Image (cartoon, grey):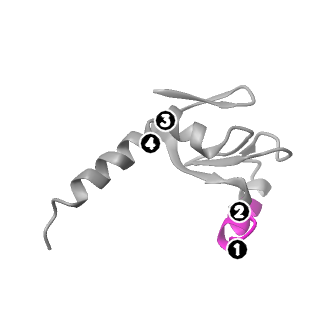
Amino acid sequence: MFIHIGNGNVIQSKDVIAIIDYQSISSSVIMGEMIKAWKKEKKIVGPKSNAKSVIVTENQIYYTTVSVSTLKKRTGITQGISNEQDFSDEISL
């Protein structure tokens, strides 16, 4: 399945490792270091200005103006999360 992530970019949903709110990156030292390293390698795509989300794949980081909630709907992640919650009650430890 392909996901339109805005700014003329389309990626495969199987390549998505993480979808992160852009504002949370500034509060994470580890994410900041990762962004700097990938920027040096020119593996960042999309405009940083007006970015709402950051999508991490194995080979690229994408800045996008599309919100995290919209991207999750496009990938079907929301459905997967709700299914996991349904099954968690059935597990006995």
Image mark for residue 29: 1
Are circles 2 and 4 on residues that touch, CB within 8 Å? Answer: no
Are circles 1 and 2 on residues that touch, CB within 8 Å? Answer: no
Residue 56, percent across and down? Answer: 60, 50
Q: Label 2 neighbourhood size at 10 Å, few (<14), some (14-19), many (20+)?
A: some
Q: Is residue 85 above or below residue 13?
A: below
Which residue is under mark 2? 25
Disc 1 to disc 4, C-alpha distance: 26 Å
Q: Quadrant of residue 27?
A: bottom right
Which residue is under mark 3? 75
The one of 37 and 28 positioned closer to us in this rendering: 28
Residue located farthest toward the left when viewing the structure as drawn: 92
Question: Which three-letter amino acid code belongs to the residue tagged 4?
Answer: Ile
Q: Label 4 neighbourhood size at 10 Å, few (<14), some (14-19), many (20+)?
A: some
Q: Is residue 31 magenta?
A: yes
Q: What is the magenta range?
A: 26-37
Residue 43, percent across and down? Answer: 71, 47
**Which type of secondary structure does the marked residue at label 1 adopt?**
helix
Is 14 left or right of 9, judged from the image as shown? left
Disc 4 to disc 3, C-alpha distance: 5 Å
Q: Label 3 neighbourhood size at 10 Å, few (<14), some (14-19), many (20+)?
A: some
Q: Nearer the viewer, mark 1 or mark 2?
A: 2
The one of 19 and 15 positioned closer to us in this rendering: 19
The tag earlier along the polypeptide, 1 or 4, is 1
Which residue is under mark 4? 77
Disc 3 to disc 2, C-alpha distance: 21 Å
